[in-house]
Image (tube, grey):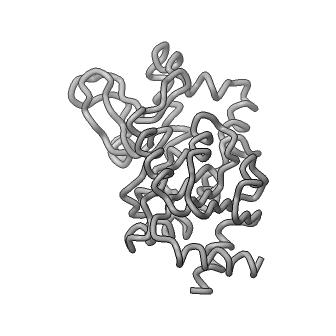
Amino acid sequence: MENKIEQLKEIINESNKITFFTGAGISVASGIPDFRSIGGLYDEISKKGLSPEYLLSTEYFQNDPDGFINFCHEYLLFADKKPNIVHDWIAELENEGKSLGVITQNIDGLHTDAGSEEVDELHGTLNRFYCIECDQDYSKSEVIEKNLRHCENCGGPIRPDIVLYGEMLNQSTIFSALNKIREADTLVVLGSSLVVQPAAGLISNFEGKNLVIINLDSTPYDHDADLVIHEDMVKVIEALKNEA
């Protein structure tokens, strides 16, 4: 892996418009299991005979808003989860002016927690909640600390600002993500299988110099990449920082 770390270091040093694209794998080191991995949300709920897709759908929220928010409190709100070294590294490069920002498939909000400001959250974020009746905003910390299920202003149901099954991705977020990819000289993919559409299809719009993929498993875009590292990304970034 040493040669690949050297190559990654060279690419990062020579790049001035890096865009990051992240998936569930980046948050595993923060204690958030991959959605479909053993021990992940899908696995845990399926064992109880429930459908994760239904519980995360607009249909379920409309049919049983109380059940939906109770589900969010039990399975989605990770009050104790913090950004890891990879989130921090991405935020540092943005702060240094070398990165255009990050595009993420994750809803955990850890990129913004790490200090990244230019974040396109394709599937929304659990860091924001809102009342569907009066649009009152709530932070994740408020919802957790006050154990909120209903709006303090009007009593209406509150929900996280995430994209549920049956909803469209936010178009302005998609356009922002496309601009980041098209303007980038380097695109670094971290912890994504690049199979979930339409998010993963954004990668095909990259026309810059270096495509880097860091993921434990192979992806459909490996053959197009200039550098592929199938290793634990925490170890990769630790090694990279030690080389700096």
Q: Position of residue 168 (x, y in %)?
A: 48, 26
Q: Nearer the viewer, residue 61 or 197?
A: 197
Which residue, as the protein is rendered here, is positioned at the far top? Answer: 63
How many marks can you see?
Answer: 0
> Where on the picture, by quarter, is residue 173?
top left
The residue shown at (49%, 58%) is 184
The residue shown at (29%, 29%) is 151
Looking at the figure, which quarter contains the C terminus? bottom right
User: Is 48 placed left or right of 197 in the picture?
Assistant: right
User: Does 44 appear above or below 117?
Assistant: above
Which residue, as the protein is rendered here, is positioned at the far bottom? Answer: 243
Q: Position of residue 215 (x, y in %)?
A: 71, 58
Q: Nearer the viewer, residue 50 or 37?
A: 37
The residue shown at (65%, 50%) is 192
User: Does 152 appear above or below 92?
Assistant: above
Q: Position of residue 178 (x, y in %)?
A: 47, 44
Q: Position of residue 181 (x, y in %)?
A: 50, 51
User: Is 49 placed left or right of 97 in the picture?
Assistant: right
User: Is 220 placed left or right of 16 in the picture?
Assistant: right
Looking at the figure, which quarter contains the N terminus? bottom right
The residue shown at (27%, 23%) is 155
User: Does 74 appear above or below 51?
Assistant: below
Which residue, as the protein is rendered here, is positioned at the far left? Answer: 153
